[in-house]
Structure formats: C-alpha cells, structure tokens
C-alpha cells in the first residue's frame, strides 16, 4: 500500500534544498517511534497542525513537504496490521517478565522499539502507528448502549492521527518530495 505522506519542517528559506534533499530525519531525542523520517499519513491538516504547535508557538515558520511512502515494503504497522500489534504486545510482556522493563516510565514505545532493534528482532524499514491525542474523546463512536444503565458501551476511534517513521528510505520513500504548504504560485 502506498500513501501520501506529509513531513513538517522548519522554514529556513531553503525550499530548493528541502525538495532536493528531503525528507529529513527527526533529530529530537523524544521521537515517538525512534530514529527516522517522520510523516503524517494522508492528512495535510495534521502536518499543518503540528507546525503550528511545534514551530509557530516558538516564533518560527514551517513548511510541509509531501511524497509517497510505500508501506508494503517491510513496514511494522501498529495501526493496520493486527499481527504486528499482537507481536508488539507480546514483546512488551516478554521484556516485562525478563526484567528489561522495570516500571511504566521505561515502557515507552521508542524504548520497546529500541530494545527490539538491540535484540535483532526488528528488521523493518518503517513503522506506522496511531496516537490517542487529546481529541480522542471527540472521535469515539459507540456500538451499543447498556440496557440496564443507559451507558454507552464498546466503541471505536475514528480519525486517529497516524504517523509513519521511515528508518530506511530505500524503496520506501518515493520521489518527488515537494513542498505543498504554504501554498506557492
């Protein structure tokens, strides 16, 4: 499956360089999925929102680049692949039982992925995952109502923010990479 992917970058008045050399890896130490090039899956508005919250709030401008990302080429899909989600859950259980994870503060997604890499059990070129941001409550759609209490029961989340972290660009990021925001003439 190939998706449109959007990367939010600081605007350093270097659009030609961005389009020629981008996308770029994240350099933040607290990157959610570990080292790689981060994208928003299919939604330009998520990329713009991230720019407002990450750059504009600090008085900086931002741009958004767009390319195609091939998720069929060795993607660890924690959003759309049930087997990968079960594998990840089981890996967490094994790390807990072995003492590799001692408390909840160590049980962070990037830590688990890094442990998997260190153990040689993570051979993927990209990772795809959804987060449950502050707007998650607004995205709940319920399946039924409890007849006794009137309480809403079982739900699914719609419109989850989905991120892609590309670790190995080869055969995953498809060119061109073009700046699409702010809109240019």
Image (cartoon, grey):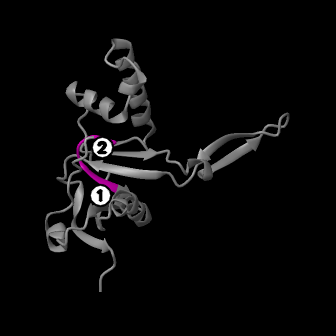
Question: In this picture, which residue range is highlighted in magenta?
Answer: 30-39
Question: Does residue 147 sit above or below 126 in this rendering?
Answer: above
Q: Residue at x 83, y 35 (%)?
A: 149
Q: Is residue 154 visible?
A: yes
SS type, badge 2: loop
Q: How many discs appear?
A: 2
Q: Position of residue 67 (x, y in %)?
A: 28, 65
Question: Does residue 67 sit above or below 123 in this rendering?
Answer: below
Q: Is residue 72 visible?
A: no
Question: What separation in Å lies between label 2 and label 1 (alpha carbons)?
Answer: 19 Å
Residue tagged 2 = 31
Image quarter hosting the N terminus: bottom left
- Number of the label disc, if any, that sits on residue 160: none
Asked whether 101 or 80 is in front, the reply is 101
Question: Does residue 126 sit above or below 62 in this rendering?
Answer: above
Residue tagged 1 = 69
Q: Position of residue 142 (x, y in %)?
A: 69, 46
Query: Main SS of the magenta segment?
Result: loop
């Amino acid at each position: 499956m190939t998706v449109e992917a959007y990367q939010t970058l600081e605007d350093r008045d270097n659009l030609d360089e961005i389009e020629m050399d981008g996308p770029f890896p994240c350099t933040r130490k607290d990157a959610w999925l570990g080292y790689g090039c981060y994208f928003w899956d299919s939604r330009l508005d998520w990329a713009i929102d991230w720019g407002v919250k990450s750059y504009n709030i600090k008085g900086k401008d931002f741009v958004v680049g767009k390319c195609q990302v091939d998720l069929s080429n060795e993607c660890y899909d924690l959003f759309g692949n049930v087997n990968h989600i079960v594998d990840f859950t089981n890996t967490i259980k094994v790390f807990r039982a072995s003492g590799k994870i001692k408390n909840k503060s160590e049980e962070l997604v990037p830590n688990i992925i890094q442990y998997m890499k260190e153990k040689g059990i993570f051979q993927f070129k990209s990772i795809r995952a959804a987060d449950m941001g502050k707007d998650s409550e607004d995205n709940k759609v319920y399946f039924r109502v409890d007849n006794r209490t009137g309480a809403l029961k079982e739900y699914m989340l719609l419109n989850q923010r989905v991120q892609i972290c590309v670790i190995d660009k080869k055969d995953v990021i498809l060119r061109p990479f073009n700046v699409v925001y702010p809109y240019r003439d």
